[in-house]
Amino acid sequence: MADRVQEILSWYESDNAGTKANLARMLRHGKLAGTGKLVILPVDQGFEHGPARSFAPNPAGYNPHYHFQLGIDAGCNAYAAPLGFLEAGASHFAGQIPLILKLNNHDVLHDEKDPLPSVTSSVRDALRLGCVAVGFTIYPGSAHCQTMYEQLRAITEEAKASGLAVVVWSYPRGSSLSKEGETAIDVGAYAAQIAAQLGAHIIKVKLPTAHLEQAAAKKVYDSTQIPIKTLAERVRHVVQSSFDGRRIVIFSGGAKSEDQNVFDEARAIRDGGGFGSIIGRNSFQRPKAEAVKFLHTIMGIYAGEVQ
């Protein structure tokens, strides 16, 4: 299995030893260590959606230490969060799980049609807290996307020079896209390509639907008969759009839903050649024992232990 990790690292040809070592730390940590698959626990929802919406279903989640321990007990590859949550536990849990500092965040108190998140922490913060990577959200389709791309360019340059990996949340959103278009296959594949072109090591996107949003793209999808009928086919196309699978692409878990739905999605990600999942609300909104069992099932699907 270690050979799979070495193969993945070989795709990042321009990166220094520090960045590759930090990528390897994620790929070689937890229950999926060495498989080339990732299950990451993200807890930025307190900032993004508000504390009650995020943590009231499982009040233990109001405590920052809870999420560190959940990620450790479940054997996740990494734990991602904004500055405050990581500062509240990074020292206590130092070295027990790879950390990703989310550098920008957006709240819903003024939920504009064309979002522009605030940069809320820095690469220096990530180094101070012992992180392996920084995370950054871009919204392709927003009227402010150029600003986000330029912010990410500067952050990526500094992170790579400092030996950190870069994880990009690439979420299409904006007044020029329909609600259905935010998860359309042509838009989702485009968003993954943009993140890859901006230098992301790991790309996080939403699972795509079969909807085609752009008229010009629809003509190409129809004329070339790109397979997009099943979720596994759509995952495969998104991965193909990320440098023909030479960038790590993981898929978000979304709002809490029925277990079987999430497990079926994990199977489609696995069968489509995806690299794994980043699952927040579907894990931390459950009682801890239930969440650990739930995450172990997903990891078993990715490892081929659960069909």
Image: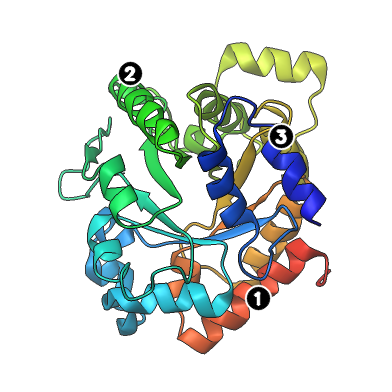
Residue 71, horizontal then vertical, whole percent: 49, 72
**Separation of residues labelled 3 and 1 (CA atoms):** 29 Å
Q: Report the number of numbered marks.
A: 3
For disc 3, the neighbor class at 10 Å (few under 14, some 14 to 19, many from 20) is few
Query: In the image, is 129 to the left or to the right of 267?
Result: left
Label 3 or label 2, whichever comes before in sequence order: 3
**283 with respect to 138 (left or right):** right
Quarter of the image where the C terminus is located? bottom right
- The answer to which image quadrant residue 14 occupies is top right
The mark nearer the N terminus, 3 or 1, is 3
Judging by the rendered image, the residue that carries numbered circle 2 is: 146
Instruction: Tell me, for residue 296, which label it has, or none.
Output: 1
Mark 1 and mark 2: Cα distance apart in space: 39 Å
Amino acid, disc 1:
His
Q: Residue furthest left?
A: 109
> Looking at the image, is 226 positioned above or below residue 296?
above
Q: Name the spot of residue 47 as percent of width and height, x first.
A: 24, 57
Mark closer to the observer (3, 1): 3
| Residue 41 vertical position relative to residue 270 in the rendered view, above or below | below
Q: Residue furthest front?
A: 17
Q: Earlier in the sequence, mark 1 or mark 2?
A: 2
Where is residue 301 shown, x and y percent of the image? 75, 66
What SS does tag 1 mark? helix
Point out which mark residue 155 bears: none
Q: Looking at the rendered structure, which numbered label has been put on residue 10?
A: 3
Residue at position x 65%, y 18% from top?
A: 218
Type of amino acid at the residue the image marks with label 2: Gln
At which x and y percent is residue 50?
A: 23, 62
Q: Quadrant of residue 58?
A: bottom left
